[in-house]
Amino acid sequence: MASSNTSWSEKNFSCPICLDVFNSPVTTACGHNFCRTCITTFWDDQVQYKCPVCNELFHTRPDLRVNTFISELVNQLGSSIQSKRVKEQPCVEPGEVLCDFCTGTQLKAVKSCLVCYTSYCHTHLEPHQRVARLKKHRLVDPMDRLEDRMCKKHDRLLELFCQTEQVCVCLYCTVTDHKSHSVVPLKEEYEVKTAHLGKIKSKVQQMIQERQRKIQDIKDTVDYSQAYADREIADGVQVVTALKRSIEKWQDEHTQTVKEKLKSTEQVAEYLIKQLEQEIEDLTNRSSEVKQLSHNEDHLQFLQTFRSLKIPPHTRDWITVEVHPPSYVGTLRRTLDQLEKTLSIEMKKLGDDAELKRVQQYEVDVTLDPDTAHPHLILSEDGKQVHDESVGKKLLENPKRFTQHLYVVTRQSFSSERFYFEVLVKDKTAWILGVARKSVHRQDFTITPENGFWIIVFNNNKLKSNDNPAVLLPLRAELQKVGVFVDYDEGLVSFYDVEAKVHIYSATGCKFREPLFPILSPGYYYGGENSAPLIISPANQTDYDHLIITQETNDQNN
């Protein structure tokens, strides 16, 4: 019985205009009932006021009053009617347009009205098929957000795209404001923009991947820095153990220095990683926006949204960004020097030995450049040896060639990080070793740091630096092999007696603003004296005769 009552109630308490359950029902003088909003809207567009049901004509607009009886019945039966409707209504698929007039669960719209800016299901479309005035309205396939699809100026459907002003227009716009503009159908521009969107999506993904790789590079550098720091601390502990309690204070200070440098590197890395992660987050958000938009097949909505697509987030150029591991070269030695008054020679040897082992890890393979060699110099075929012949050769002019001083530089240059090389100086009475900046004058010059030279000079059994004025360096024994280490970022150039494992000299606080070349001078040949060559040799290789034999073998093979 309840079910039949519900059916009767729904049929008899529906507005003849919207066909839905009454909402604020009112009664006309002819006795018919309507929703207040429905009958008011209906009469707003009429010249004469008549009943939509019986067509009775009213000379003046009727004064509508609420039908309290129907209102109370609707309120009592509303929940049961709504429950029954929910059970009977089919599910609406995602992406389908819903009826704007349905209350409760909305049904799928079958048509949209371009006059009413409303979408209707089969039931609520009935007045547009019955009422003469509504039949004149233009019905189209269901569309959502109808008010956004209409030209505000001409009240026509936006069907075209103006490429000149990059806006959607209606047909009337093409003969008025956009008369001379390039106009194409929405679908055509949609396809162009979709293709462009694919490129944007690919670019964003590439940027994300690049930043992810940069994060990994930074993390790898931090891991390497940690291992490097561990080795440095271990070396310090070894020295402390050898010298026991007299240097316990040094051990703490040295360890703290290393950890502070490591911490500084980690902080820089953490800062860069946070920047990269933020850029990845921004780019990921943009990728999501692009992806969401790329799946939108609604031409108009796509183009309108594409136009408002935000400018890509500002990103940093990460190609040149690097995290350099901290340099500990000289840390141990400088600390030991501070305790020189109380510590033994053995401590100095231990420190220099450990430092030499560390800098040898940065060994590079360099060869001499014949285009830069003074005309008196003779280079081996492999570019590893140089000596003075004291006889000038006729060579083609070359702006890179040294013509006034007996110098030659390597083919390889270095403009960042650290590098190390060793040179055999055995049996020589004069030589010069070091590094020079790329722009040094190749003709007449003075070999000072101000002119771009950081070298040491051996002559007349004396060793000195090229500071201005020159600094005489201690010479403990005959030098066999000299190691040269450069930390570009730290502005450090250090020289080592490889055989004795002793630090010779360091130039600190150097300002490197351009590439550096290893530079050599074998010194002049004086009638049998100083005839031995300077030889660029591998680290841990000190046998001069072995090098000569190897070189002769290579020459024969060539």
Image: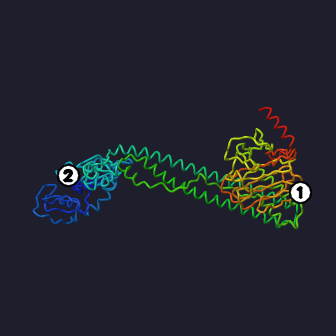
Q: Inspect the image, locate mark 1, and give the three-letter code of the amino acid beneath it.
A: Arg
Q: Is residue 365 visible?
A: no
- Dot 2 alpha-carbon crowd within 10 angstroms: few under 14, some 14 to 19, many 20 or more: some
Secondary element under disc 1, as helix, strand or loop, is: loop
Is 197 situated left or right of 374 in this image?
A: left
Among the 4 quarters of the image, the one containing residue 334 = bottom right
Residue that badge 2 annotates: 134
Sequence-wise first label, 1 or 2: 2
In this view of the protein, which residue sits in the foreground, 535 or 378?
378
Tag on residue 476?
A: 1
User: What residue type is disc 2 on?
Assistant: Leu
Q: Residue at x 76, y 59 (%)?
A: 507
Work out whether residue 76 or residue 144 is closer to the camera in this orientation and state it. 144
**Residue at coordinates 23% horizontally, 49% vertically from top-left?**
138
Q: Position of residue 417 (x, y in %)?
A: 69, 53
Q: From the viewer's perspective, is 425 left or right of 13?
A: right
Residues packed near mark 1 inside 10 Å, few (<14), some (14 to 19) or many (20 plus): few
| Quarter of the figure that contains the N terminus | bottom left
**Residue 476 in sight:** yes
Residue 92, position in %: x, y?
36, 48
In space, the residues marked 1 and 2 are separated at their CA atoms by 112 Å
